[in-house]
Image (cartoon, rainbow, N blue to C red):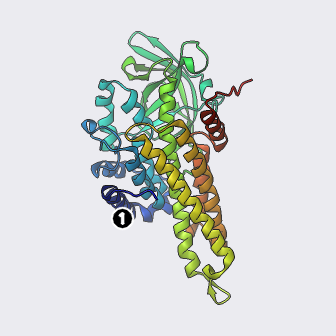
Amino acid sequence: MFELTEERRDLSDLAARVAADRFASKARQWDENRTFFPVEERRKLGELGLLGLTLPEEYGGGGRPLLDALLVIEELAKVNPLSGWPVFEASAGPARVIHLFGTEEQRGRILPAVASGDITIAVSISEPDAGSAATDVATSACVEGDEVVINGTKRWCSGAGHAEKYLVYVRFGTDAGAAGMGAVLVDKEAAGLTFGPQEHLMGHRGVGSADMFFDNVRVPVRDIIVDKGGFRKLFTAFSIERLGNSTMSLAIGQASLDRTAQYVQERRQFGKEIAEFQLVQAGLADMVMQVRAARMLVYQAAASAGTGAPSALDASVAKCFANEMAKQVSDMAMQLHGGYGYSAEYEVERLHRDAHGWALAGGTPAIQRSRITAEYLGRRFNQRG
């Protein structure tokens, strides 16, 4: 069993108290209204030191290992997934690219505002013809003097239209594949950047998702975060992001299990608690096993990462298992709740909807399986043959 230190238990307890006091009662309303996470609440998380946990202390962060941030994400997301989102973005998302690969000037200029909650950064990778095939990105970036001119279309950007800044994956020049790829930071208010209407998704409501259109968008050269040919650096950041994703799935699984364990001891049929029936016990036991297994995979990968990035193999194994666990466990929760599981009042159906979203984001389980095999065998497989 993975034992947490007393300091980590205290951190987890603090996050649980904040979640219960500020966010638990708002989960259903925010989901129904597709409410964006309020900026003032994001700043409150920053004040409490829960936002930029993995960012360096000299830039206002906590300087903590990745596991610490994942503990906080889980406690917040268990009661209200939207409240875990800004911590995910700051401590396991695009801000980490700037932390790990940006210049001293970029870190000093950008990260303090992330840690305080004044800004959030969304990552913009996918395009109409580049989803799982991330290296097919066609959005172009051309350096002209002291500016970068960006043209193209992005899709499925979580936070699009709401985040203050975007880490945009682009292609410098004409080199195909990973060789021409890099990343540029773009402000929401940049001239020439427009957003399509908000997508009405099955889950992830309140996160925001919209097409992004770049029409001769000009940003300073100093906002090139990863230059041409730096895709390997960006891929390293994927592994960190995948553990954040895994933790959001873990939170769904644990919340589904907690709600179901309580329900089956309260609900009575045929004169006794339904927890007395063996089929109910079997379903609950499967949920317990899957949640515990997912937690061990996530914790192991995060522990090996320390303050850096986990191995690609550990991250993909954790993400694939946790994503599928969340779907299966939340589905079993709906079944064991019976008709109530299908009711929005009990919020189990929300957990199931969100579980499918996390499995699609950041590389599907199918893609993770291909990645796991490649990493385990030490080979690369050409998907374009």
- Is 110 left or right of 83, judged from the image as shown? left
Q: Which residue is mark 1?
A: 21
Does the rendering let one see residue 248?
Answer: no
Quarter of the image for residue 219 reads top left
Q: Looking at the picture, which amino acid does disc 1 mark?
A: Asp
Residue 110 appears at what percent x and percent y? Answer: 33, 32
> Which residue lies at the image location 55% right of the left edge and 59% below the top edge?
291
Q: Quadrant of the C terminus?
A: top right
Q: Residue furthest left?
A: 58
- Is 26 left or right of 173, judged from the image as shown? left
> Which residue lies at the image location 59% right of the left edge and 77% below the top edge?
264
**Mark 1, residues whose alpha carbon is within 10 Å: few (<14), some, or many (≥20)?**
few
> Which residue lies at the image location 35% right of the left edge and 42% below the top edge?
54
Q: Residue furthest bottom?
A: 271
Residue 160 appears at what percent x and percent y? Answer: 50, 38
Quarter of the image for residue 210 reads top right
> Which residue lies at the image location 62% right of the left edge and 44% below the top edge?
360
